[in-house]
Image (spheres, helix red, strand yellow):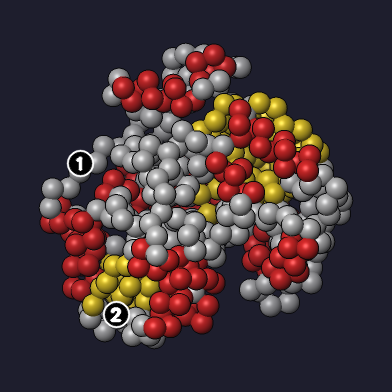
Amino acid sequence: MSMYNFPEPCAPRYKKPRSFEDCLPHARSMICKVTGTERPSIGVATRFHIKKGDQVLIVTVPDQDKYVAEAVKQAILESGAEKVDFIYPQDLVGKDPQHYSVADGWREAELLEEGKASGTATDLLTGLGLGEAAGRYLDEHPEYTIVFLDVAGGNAKRALGKHAEKFGGYFPFNNWEWFLSRAHTFPLELWQAIEKKLVEPLGKAADVRITDPEGTHLEFSLTPEEAKRWEGYAMLHGHLIFSPLHATSGEYREHRPGTLDAPMVFPKVTGVLAGTSNHCGFFPRIETYFDQDRLVDVRGGGEYGDRIRKILDKNKDIQWPGYPERGYFWFCDTALCTSVGAFRRTSDMFDSLWIYPNLLERTRAGVFHLGFGSRASRGEEEFDAYAKEHNLPRGHIHVHNYFATFEVRIQGSRNWYKIVDKGWISAMSDPDIRAIAAKYGLPDKLLSYDWVPPLPGINCDGDYLKDYAPNPMAYLKSRLEKSQTI
């Protein structure tokens, strides 16, 4: 493994609150009063968009920090709401969530087999189906005007059914450490300007290359028409869609009139995706090999790799509707999250009520989560019917890359532009972006990462292949025991 020059490990240090007053200023800063009839569209950036007279329902979990809850309630009431109620899984589905640990990264493959994989689950918080249950609860309690539910994903709103218009956004704030993050108060104007700069080059891409020091090297090419379609669907605030297949799938196009009949873009991704972590946690280093978008080989990965190989072999002859060839696993996810202040929280990483306890680390700007599985080709109903007929689990699974370089060759030239350079969002060095940042504070402070993970031999002392790759969890635990940053 080659040596690379990357920023050294760092992480924020937030103090555990001792009263709700410790949380109240932060809660107030997340309030956005709504004076018109329409609430703004909801992205990954959680803000509480409150109208006067709102009756608010918040779906959370049993380890909800009481000071955070009190502060959020107080801030929402101050903004003009009439009442704020918290509700728990026991009240909605009759049972509480299980406890999970980031030591069990292999579980992401298990969740796929169980039909709870990312991309299909209507509840990425607990996996208990809180979205549908909250919809039924609203049938009985129609007085609530807005509900905050789940922690990520695009299915929570749809799960509410006829109450979908009451979805106010996510509530990932059971944990005090995550609640206090500056990620939730980052200026939205600045955030949106950065994302616009990130997406613009996609429409001019002729070739794309993704590399990472953990061993990833992927390439694909696009026609000018395919590139423009990719750019047109890549913008999803906080979670940019850097996979052409994902961007042009039926999952998002069905909400944009006149586009559903256009075929998906299969960019023929070829190469290797390697890493040691996913949404569930960590695992021995895995190498997944792709040829023309399809997964063809899996090496290493411990139990995670074993489970993927089993699924791959069992379903190698199936053909998803609208797909050009047979094969179960397709490279269908290259997501770039853009939250500058996000970090890997440690307060509950070994005892979490989140079904994906490692989910939040991938929200930091510059961290890619790359995945393989399937995406609905034209619409969810056709895809679901095929999966049911053939007894196939739907969804996709992931590998995280922390220091990736994502670059595009501009059409008609030999010039390569690095949209992300060794984990650094290039747009944050753009003079126009820094000028916007200056309106809100010091650009160097605003446009910097709070968290950089340790990878021995890459950005800190040690040998990646000897000290980290065989057992990432043991390495991270040893650093924790020494009070070192992870």
What residue lies at 41% left-to-right and 79% top-to-bottom?
Answer: 138
Marks 1 and 2, the one that precedes in the sequence: 1
* Mark identifier at residue 55: 2
Q: Position of residue 134 (x, y in %)?
A: 43, 72
- C-alpha separation, residue under disc 1 versus residue under disc 2: 31 Å
- Whether 39 is drawn above or below 444: the answer is below
- Whether 261 is drawn above or below 181: the answer is below
Image quarter for residue 241?
bottom right
Q: Is residue 150 visible?
A: yes
Residue type at the position of mark 2: Gln
Q: Position of residue 405 (x, y in %)?
A: 60, 35
- Disc 1 designates what residue? 15
User: Which quadrant of the rendered structure holds the C terminus?
Assistant: top left
Q: Are marks 1 and 2 in contact (CB under 8 Å)?
A: no
Asked whether 387 or 342 is in front, the reply is: 387
- Whether 338 is drawn above or below 302: the answer is below
Q: Position of residue 31 (x, y in %)?
A: 28, 67
Q: Is residue 484 visible?
A: no
User: Which quadrant of the rendered structure holds the N terminus?
Assistant: top right
What residue lies at 75% left-to-right and 41% top-to-bottom?
Answer: 312
**Residue 280 appears left or right of 447:** right
* Mark identifier at residue 249: none
What residue lies at 28% left-to-right and 45% top-to-bottom?
Answer: 177
Asked whether 173 or 293 is in front, the reply is: 173
Q: Position of residue 44 (x, y in %)?
A: 45, 59
Residue type at the position of mark 1: Lys
